[in-house]
Image (tube, grey):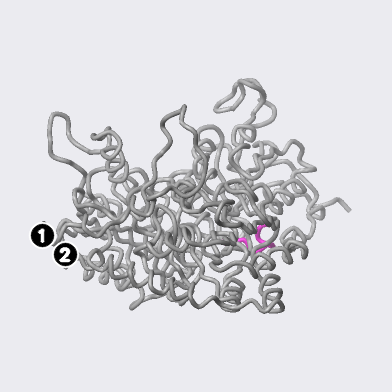
Amino acid sequence: MEKKMITVSQGIARLLEQMGTEFVFGLNGHGNWGLLDALVYETNIECIGARMEDQAVELADGVWRYKRGGALPIVTTSVGPGNANIMPAIATAYYESIGMLALVGVGATHWFDRGGIEEAYRDGPEDFAGAIRGICKRAVMATRPDTTIDMFLRAYKTALTGRPGPVVMAIPFDIQHALIPEDSLPDPRPYMEVHRPAADPAGIARAIELMKKAERPLVVFGSGVANSGAHQALIDFAEATGTPVVATSAGKAQFPETHRLSAGVMGRAGTLDGNHMARRSDLIIGVGTHFTDIDTGGWTLFDIPGNAKLVHIDIDENELGRAYPTDVALNSDARLALEALTLAAKDAGITENAAWTTELATERDKFNEAVAPLRTSNISPLHYARVCEDVSQVIAELEPETTVTFDTGHMLSYGPPFVRASSRNVFHSSFMHRMGWSASCAIGASMASGGKPAVALLGDGAFIMRSTVMLTAVEQKLPVIAVVFDNKSLQIEREAMFKIYGRESLCDYRKKGENDLWGPDFAKMAEGMGCVGVTVTKAEDFKPAFEAAMKSGMPTVISVATEIETPQYRSAWYPYPKDFSATWKPGQVPGAENHGFEMPTFAKDGE
């Protein structure tokens, strides 16, 4: 009997359906027609057409952040500029440990190295995989129909294994349509089974010895806790040992912020209590974080290895000791390491230092008292802190599980300390800081949640760059709200340039020859895309407008006029090294605690 044959594209589509794939995001182009035809017409997978390739990646990003496991979100794009458009978004996913598989179409092998339409050929035959290889977890190109399925399954497993990340697989057009035996498709389930590495018992024992001697231990954690599913393990460790816990911006909301041992968030965008605890700690237990400059105030918060020791836990061995020398480096899954540390700490009789946790409570109260005027500010145009507070209150009252994404730029200074997390569904693009990412991610997270509300907080500069993604929210009928902070400037860059140079460059938006700041009408832009558009100019009007948007279930853009001159919240100022000849090394900077937030700098309401 003659074997039944199917195309490679049909084979991949069938396997993805068997693997439980929920979403494929992509854009149609002549290089991925075979994949799209099979995915759309021969599976029950929900296939979402994005309006730009990078948005497809960021929609998948939102799905991963919401679910943190299970079947990978899939992206498919097409040859040339279509594929090139995914590069910054793929880099974001790579450096922020976001699992996904991108199936990118390229031209037919028959034409390789002839310089056919959109071929990446000048340094060799079609080599988009080579072009993107440095900014993704792995990049490969199928070269034979009879090995493509195996290559696809290995690519899938790579995206899931160890530190999750985006894998890019290029599939030539003719190979997409090549025939393979239907019965050659293997069982894909083993490629989805991942058993994570555990910590070396000797390393656990050494960490416990350091904990016995420490007077002021502190857990610092990042997104590794979320990818590991280590939320309960982190709570158990903190409570068993009485150890305070502080998040990086990537880790925000993954430990309950109302917990008595929570020290909020640390770094340039941290809470004052978080930074205080970081400076005072004599033992840092880093979990799933690589200690970036944003999270450590330009590496000025800790004095490692001077006055503090470091136990560093990470599933990626390359991150251990990158920013600071370690006393104990544990190459391990976060959950497994925390569970082992908890058991060993109980056996060793490690208990809470009441003076240390009392210090945390005191500093937390000081922070909340200091920023209360910002959270309730009535100035118009509005203060970022007031908007964040009102958003937090409404979400807690109406739908606590709402996903909140916050963008980079000026929003980065307010999302970590002022968005009160009522669930774990608070996400930030914490390394690449790609402007406008938050809107796409919120839409993807809303899809992953089954259509629950999602809120993106972003500046006007970010929204201008990426606003067309709201078309997807309209098409998918999703209750996604974009809150656009409209100050007609790149405010964080403006502020820093004035501080360093006494003037700004290309930050303020103006029409040629005019002095007044200028910007588009975002409410009208929103209405033109099919969203509800709202403009808010007074503090007292924002909360009712946001409540109405939450209750409406409609895609909404709320344009909020925000001030630009009032001194802002900064928990830690740190200089960028600009003198090439100057010596630099990480460590605490004398007086660094005075570089940031000072109550007297804030103007009173109406000033």
Answer whether residue 330 is visible to the viewer in this image: yes
Identify residue type, mark 2: Asn
For marks 1 and 2, give the CA distance: 8 Å
On residue 606, the disc is 1
Answer whether residue 194 is visible to the viewer in this image: no
Q: Position of residue 429 (x, y in %)?
A: 46, 52
Q: Determine whether 91 is above or below 350 in the image.
A: above
Q: 107 or 571, which is in the foreground? A: 571
Q: Residue at x 37, y 50 (%)?
A: 591
- Asked whether, in this view, residue 233 is left or right of residue 55, the answer is right
Dot 1: element: loop
- Asked whether, in this view, residue 533 is left or right of residue 285, the answer is left
Identify residue type, mark 1: Gly
| Farthest right residue in view | 1
User: Looking at the figure, which quarter contains the C terminus?
Assistant: bottom left
Q: 362 or 35, which is in the foreground? A: 362
Dot 2: element: loop
Q: Quadrant of residue 282?
A: bottom right
Can residue 21 be found in the magenta stretch?
A: yes
- Asked whether, in this view, residue 371 is left or right of residue 216, the answer is left
Per the image, the residue denoted by label 2 is 378
| Magenta segment boundaries in residue numbering | 16-22
Q: Position of residue 599 (x, y in %)?
A: 24, 60
Do the CB atoms of the residues marked 1 and 2 lie less than 8 Å apart? yes
